[in-house]
Image (cartoon, rainbow, N blue to C red):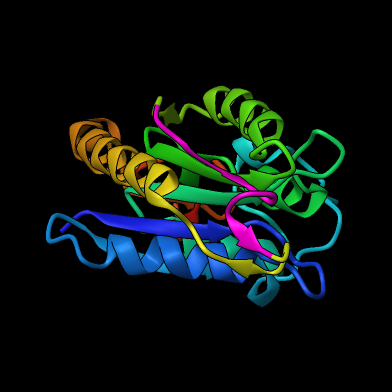
Amino acid sequence: MTGIGIILGSTRPHRKGPQVARWVLDIASRRDDADFELIDLCEHPLPHLAEPVPPMFGPSVHSHTRAWAERVAPFDGFVIVTPEYNQSAPSVLKNAIDHVYAEWADKAVGFVSYGVHGGVCAASQLRQLCGTLGMAAVGPQAAISLHTDFENHTDFTPGDRPTAALDKMLDQVVAWSSALAPLRRPATDTIDAEGTDHDDAERIPVTR
């Protein structure tokens, strides 16, 4: 079955993201065409990107990056839940995306954004980033207003509009994740201990 990861892209204390992400997971879990799982960046702390080589050129030397790669690699697509900070996506989310490369390629992605104006600027920036990484960003997105979709600006009370938008977005994320499956190669490959791919060399498994 198609697997979709729901990435919660905020790590701030007293963040509103968990309410939104749980809502996404609750609605998504009622579907029978994919399996959905929450990925909370608070559970995957990553330092500021300090890889000796760009992630596109091979496996990381750092255990935290390898662990993050192993977490996201099995999924066929993603839903990113993001707040908007100063008309931009959170730096912790950008940092997490930048830490790996091959694990994102040829996978679909949809966006659930929230903010004063629905978080649309954050989602727009993420669309460009994900496109650069070879992801297929679907058109529909759920944009949630802090003014109208949160009671007293604290308790998430989504209405019919964001719920309908979420359903439409999930339809396309699942469909595109399935359609892109032939393009995805396994996240693991083999290279020799010198970093060269030779049939007669000693071969070790790596995560790309």
> At 63% from the left edge and 60% from the top edge, which residue is drawn?
150
If the image is split into quadrants, where does the N terminus sit?
Answer: bottom left
Q: Is residue 203 visible?
A: no
Residue 68 occupies quadrant? bottom right
> At 74% from the left edge and 68% from the top edge, which residue is drawn?
15
- Residue 121 vertical placement versus 75 (above, below): above
**Magenta segment: does it hold 147?**
yes
Place of residue 4 in the rendered image (x, y in percent of width and height, measured from the top left): 34, 55
> At 57% from the left edge and 27% from the top edge, which residue is drawn?
127
- Residue 152 vertical placement versus 141 (above, below): below
Place of residue 90 in the rendered image (x, y in percent of width and height, measured from the top left): 77, 48
Q: Can residue 135 be seen in this view?
A: yes
Place of residue 165 in the rendered image (x, y in percent of width and height, measured from the top left): 37, 39
Q: Which of 195 and 166 is in front in this view?
A: 166
Place of residue 7 in the rendered image (x, y in percent of width and height, measured from the top left): 53, 58
Q: Which of 73 and 136 is in front in this view?
A: 136
Residue 8 occupies quadrant? bottom right
Q: Nearer the viewer, residue 142 or 88?
A: 142
Whether residue 39 sits left or right of residue 88 in the image: it is left
The magenta span reads 140-151
**Magenta segment: does it hold 23?**
no
Whether residue 113 sits left or right of residue 13 in the image: it is left
Whether residue 114 sits left or right of residue 103 in the image: it is right
- Residue 35 vertical placement versus 13 (above, below): above
